[in-house]
Amino acid sequence: MAESDGPSYIDYETFLDPDFSPTAFANSLVIATNNPSDTPIDLSTPLSRVLFDIQEIDTHIHTLTTKSAIPLLTHTKTQADAGQKIVSEVEAQVASLTDGYQRLEKEVIQRYEEANQVRIAVERLWETVQVGRALARCLTLGRQLETQMAEVGGVGGTTGSTKKEDHRAMVRASNTLLAARQILSASGPNEEGEHLSKINLITYLQNSVITPSETSLRNRAQQIIREFSLSSLASSSAAPTTYAQSEETKSRTTSALLTLQLLNPRLLIAALQTYLRASLTSSLTSMGKALNNLPTLDRTLLEVSARCQNIMALESLLAATKPPQTTPPDSIAQVQEHLTNLLEPLLAALDTSSLPSFFWRSLAEGLGPRVADLVARGGVTARALRGQRDRVKDSVRDCVLRGSQSPGDPTRQAGAWEREAAVMVGSVTGALGR
C-alpha cells in the first residue's frame, strides 16, 4: 500500500501485527520522547505523534476512496441490478407457486373437507342404523318373550290368563332370554349393544319384561323340580297315577331342567342339590321319629323308599337329557359344553357315582348318631329296638332294595344295592349290639 501510493513513515507492519498492544505501543512512544531521568514527563510530544499518524492514515483512506469511487459505485450498481433480476425471477416463481397452491386448495383440500364431512355423516348414519337394528331386535325379542311367558301359563305375561300351561314354552322363553342377554351384554366398542344402555326404552324393557320373566322362569322351574315325584309307593297328591301322567311329569321336569341350564348352570346344580337335601332331611327326621315309635316304622320306610325311587327316576331323567346347544356366556357353561347329559355335572358336584348311593350313604351317616342316642337314653324305646332287632334289620334292608328300584320296574335286580343296604342296616342295628 505504501509502495503504490508513495513512501510513508508510518510503520503499518507494527499496527497489523496480530500481537499488537496499544499500551505497549504508547509506552514505547513515551520512552522514545522522554529521558528516563526527567522528573516531569512530557506527554504532548508522543500525543502529537499519535494524532499525526491518525491524520496521515485518514488522508490515505480519503485518497484511496476518491480514486476508487467510480469502480465501487459501478460494482455496487452491477450487484444491485443482478439482485433485482433475481428478485424478479423469484417473485414470478412465488406467484406461480401461490396460484398452484390456491388451485390445489380449491380442487383438493376443499373437496377433501367436503368429502370428510360426508364420511362423518355416513359413519354416524351407520351407527344409527346399527343401534336401530339392535333396538328393533331387542324389542322383537321382548314381545316374543311376553308371548312365550303367556304360554307358560300367565307367568310374567298378561294377568287373568286362563290358558293351559305349556311347560315347553319355558325352554323357548329361556332361549329368547339368552338371546336378549347376549345382545345387551355385547356393550364393548364396535359391538352390537354398545349404545343400548343409553336408551330409556331398553331400560324399561329390562325392568318390566326381561328381569321379571327371568325371575318367574327361575322360580317356576325350581318349583317343578322341588315337586318332582314319580313313585307310587307312598300316597301323595303330586305322584302320578297313570302312564300319561308319568310321561307328563317327566316332560315337565325336563323342561324345568333345560330352563335352569339355559338361564344359569349353577341354578340347575343348586336346585337339584336342594331337592336331594330336602329328601334326606325329611327321611332322616321321619326315620328318627319312627325308630322312637316302632308301629309307624313300616309306613315311614315306605315313604323313604318312595323318595329314593323319585331320586332314581330323577337320575334316569338327567342321564337321558342332553344339554342345550345354546349356553349362557358363563365359565361353568363353557366347561360344560362337552357334556353328554345333565347328570354328569351333578355327580361331579356331589363327588359320587350314583344318586341313590349318595342318598342311602348320606342317610346312614346321619341316622347312626340318632340311633346311638336313642339306645344311650335307654327306656322302653331302647328295649323295643333291641327286642325287635331282626324285624328292624329286615325292614330297613327291604326299604333300601325297594327304594332302589325304578318306579314301575319291580323286576330290576336288587343285588347291585346290597352294599347300600348293608350300610343302612349297620347304621340302625350297629348301636343295638347282638
Image (cartoon, helix red, strand yellow):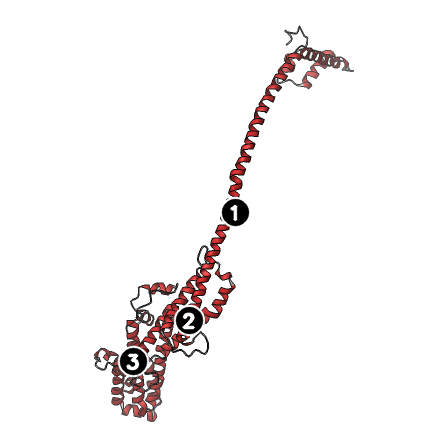
Q: Nearer the viewer, residue 400 or 196?
A: 196
Q: Residue furthest top?
A: 6
Q: Where is residue 251 drawn, in percent x and y?
A: 32, 75
Q: Is residue 388 left or right of residue 219?
A: left
Where's the N terminus, which quadrant?
A: top right
- The amino acid type found where label 2 is placed reads Thr
Mark 1 or mark 3, whichever is nearer to me: 1
Q: Is residue 427 above or below residue 144?
A: below
Residue 215 bears which disc, if any?
none
Residue 361 seen in the figure: no
1 and 3 marks in contact (CB < 8 Å): no
Residue 254 seen in the figure: yes
Element under disc 3: helix
Tell me the distance, in whole angstroms, between the alpha carbons under discs 1 and 3: 69 Å
1 and 2 marks in contact (CB < 8 Å): no
- The amino acid type found where label 3 is placed reads Ala
* Residue at numbered disc 3: 244
Q: Where is residue 367 drawn, in percent x and y?
A: 33, 83
Mark 3 or mark 2, whichever is nearer to me: 2
**Label 2: few (<14), some (14–19) or many (≥20) C-alpha neighbours in 10 Å:** some
Which mark is first along the chain, 3 or 1?
1
Q: Where is residue 267 drawn, in percent x and y?
A: 39, 71
**Residue 350 placement: quadrant:** bottom left
Q: Is residue 401 above or below residue 199?
A: below
Residue 117 bears which disc, if any?
1
Q: Nearer the viewer, residue 217 or 401?
A: 217
* Residue at numbered disc 2: 147
Element under disc 2: helix
